Image: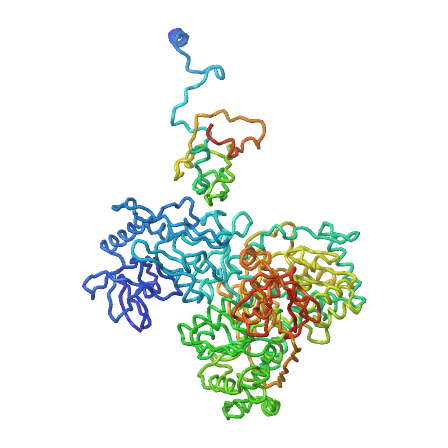
Amino acid sequence: MIKPLLQGLKITLTHLFKKPVTLQYPTERPQIEARFRGLHALKVAHSSAKCVACYLCPTVCPAKCITVEAGEDAQHNKYAEKYEIDMLRCIFCGYCVEACPVDALKMTGEFELANYKRSDFVFTKERLLEK
Amino acid sequence: MVNLTIDDKQVTVPKNTTIFDAAKAAGIRIPILCHDKKLNPFGGCRMCLVEVEQMKGRQIPACTTPVTEGMIVRTMTDEIAKARKLVLELLLLKHPVDCPVCDAAGDCDLQNLTYEYQVNSNRFTDEKFHHAIDYDNPLIERDMNRCIHCGKCARICDEIVSFGAYTFISRGIEAKMGTQFDGPLNCEFCGSCVSVCPVGALLARPFKFKARWWAMDKVKSVCSYCGTGCQLTLGVKDNKVLTTIYDENQGFHNGQLCTRGRFAYQFVNSDKRLTTPLMKKNGALVEVTWDEALNAVQQRLASAKTAGDVAGLVTPRLTNEELFVFKKLFKDGLGSENYDHSAGYAHSALSKGAVESIGVAASSAVIADIQKTGLLLVVKSDAYETHPVVGFEINLGVKRKDVDLRIISDKKGKLTKLPGAKTYLNIPGTETLLVNALAKTLVDENLVDAAAASITGFEEWKKSLDGAAPEQVAGICGLTADEIKTLARDYVKAEKALLLLPLGLGYPGHTKELAQALFNLSFAAGKHGKEGCGVLLLAEKNNSQGAVDLGLYPVAGGKDAAAIIDGCAAGSIKTLYVAGENLVVSYPNRKKVEAALDKVDFLIVQDLFLSETAALADVVLPACSFAEKEGTFTSAGKAVQKVNRAIKPVGQAKSDFEIFNTLYVNLSGKPAVADPKAAFAEITASVPAYAGLTYETLGDAGVVVVPAMTPKFAVAPGAAPTAEVGKMALVTGSALYHCGTMSLYGEGPMHVCPAGYVEIGREDAKRLTVQDDDLVTVTSAAGAVKLKVKVGSRMPEGVVFAPYHFADQSVNSIASGESVTWVTISK
């Protein structure tokens, strides 16, 4: 009877001197891998979003959380007048990034998405632009 | 019939069928880029290559090769797939592959085939095209970098529209689809080229970047502009009608549309739509609730019922079902027969003329007869302008079926330019005299059909033609006696001959008498009741024929539209219910109409927009457009077709059906008509021609109803308008781009034809020293209006033309319902 008890204490004692597996968040930050699928970002080239509003991401999105509205600029080119992602619905599958024909979208390491209001979870184009 | 085998399937098709069509009939799909159902074979894209065993396995184009007896065809082998892949690789060599920003993506033949044949890489490399993109017009964008040189746009514009805006220019690698002098596009803007373009080289600009093809719901419906009854497919997304989608299998017209049908759908989701009921309080219209508005209307109608001073004017743009409930509301709910539509005169050719001549308010021919006839006599070249898609049928008839086209008109027009067409320019207003002179020629030269003598009223009619001999009226009509006689002889000698007459608010001269004269002529020549023969009366609005079928005009003692206006002015009508009509702009004599409406104690207007008439109302009720409701329209060709609901009502708008129904229940105490389907069932029970029809039998294609006819000669005297010395003859009518006043809320027509104008011939313009776009004052006895000048070669000397649609430069402020208005023009 005493034997298993000692065995248990042994395990506890060995763990006392090991490096802890938990992080002291938020003082300690996790290391984010490059392939991590966090908050989306719209890539920028020549000081404007690369997105051409082709609607492939809202088409492929299984959660239907992306809203795009295309507009015509002064040079008659297509651009996203409105680009919104509802983070409450997003399932971070990354299909949008995969579908993008012009490599205009990426997923960042940003994972701290908590907010106070539902409306704040809708990320508009301005909030999504690559910083 | 020819028997052949396609992919081990036995197929029997008529002689002269191509392999492509034979395969299609057998349900075998052959890919193709340069062919469309209505076009002649071209053989340009080489995608439809097939192997025929008898031709030693050579690859031949299916679209240009006629079938022969015992042919054994293979539509897909490894060799064929390889050849097609090569064709696609060569096309993709120059194509920019900018699918993400191209509106055609999803509906692009090149894209679909590239995917199907898995063209993932290209063996060749070359520079792309660097053509400038044409953004010069607001409707059609031409990006020739995407063009695959299939030539469909040029062929449809030439073969069907007969305009010829496009042609290939330059040679070899520099070849491209070009316009006149490679300049900006300047055409009718019907958008037929856009509809057939297999890629995104031609795009509809009003729809540019609005939505992707796959994201839209496609709802089949019927165009709500003119009486042609073109079927269309609406592209709908987020409760908005965003575009019209081409479907080559729709309707007699195979999906072809005109400017209005294709580019004027925006009125449905216009910002100007009425979204709440309005009521006049302290002299201004303010927003109120439906309850308040309907209560006011109901109370007023209840007291008007007792006083017997109520009348109604309704637009023939409503569905049959709505018109039916409107009639019920007036007859059973208000005990009144004072209701009418289209100013009374625009339907009189049908409701009075045809009723007396053939016993039913309908044409004695259908649209399909146009291509089956031998000689087509069109009264007024405007038939193309009022009903452009009927015009396409005429083009096809003349070009492909060798129809001998004759036009009696007061001005030249598009039809005049067709190959072999002969135009007889008559003095405006003398059409009836002229038609009677044609009939008189038949009588005098013993060319009258033997069977005609047994038709009721023959002798009396024959006698009435005394004094109508060509020699006597030739001078009055502005033609020579010989011309009239030759035309009459040609008409009677043709094996099949069809007469065509457009009707409408712009044509006060197209009356009962003119229609009857035409019917008489068809009886006398024995051109009645046979295929390709008869008289086709082209009613103006989408459901004008339906309104007449349902008897939406006073029959027993009620007041007609003119009498209602007079009654309002005299004070005998105190409550007027206007549903959808904009009489201030479209009825003759604006001053008189406005004064009459001012006198009305209580004016109820039910409309989509705050029209000039609605602005005068005491209560304005917001109604629904055709895209928001279910029902049926009956076309001028008597096709009963189903309209389907595409979007939810805009704002708080209610369908006319619902509004009429509520009032009907409350005023008559009888149970409501359950829904449009129930209303249609009641209609089929009361209108003989519609007997046996149901929504199910109508299906997507609709049904052409053929009413029973009993011919009768009716005396139809003609009279020439008395010319006023020193004045010019103003004829009114429809502009090609507009229909009624509703198209003013469509983007397409307003881009091409934004304002009223007066069209003057070159000689007159020289005499008056005016040029294009000069502002002139056109003065008649009724008033004056300032209009921009359009100088053209269509108008003969002494005759000017003005379209009637526009509110700001409204022609009805000078025209008062005579067939010809005499005017002076000054700078």
- Residues B808 and A89: in front is B808
**Where B505 sits versus B519, above or below?**
above
Can you say whether B276 is above or below B709 in the image? above
Q: Residue furthest left?
A: B56
Q: Quadrant of the N terminus of chain B?
A: bottom left
Left or right for B403, reference B173: right
In this figure, which colouring scheme has been used for the structure?
rainbow
Is residue B690 in sight in this rendering?
A: no
Total number of numbered labels?
0
Judged left or right of residue B168, residue B469 is right
Which residue is more in the foreground, B407 or B97? B407
**Which image quadrant is residue B621 in?**
bottom right
Q: Residue B301, image x and y in percent?
A: 76, 62
The C terminus of chain B lies in quadrant: bottom right
Image coordinates of residue B347 in percent, x first then y, are 62, 72
Residue B55, given in percent of the width and then of the height, sits at: 20, 65
| Residue A52 showing in the rendered view | yes
Residue B371 in percent (x, y) is at: 44, 74
- At a point 40% along the width and 75% down the height, the residue shown is B401
Relative to residue B255, is residue B47 drawn left or right?
left
Q: Which one is in front, B183 or B134?
A: B183
Q: Image quadrant of residue B39?
A: bottom left
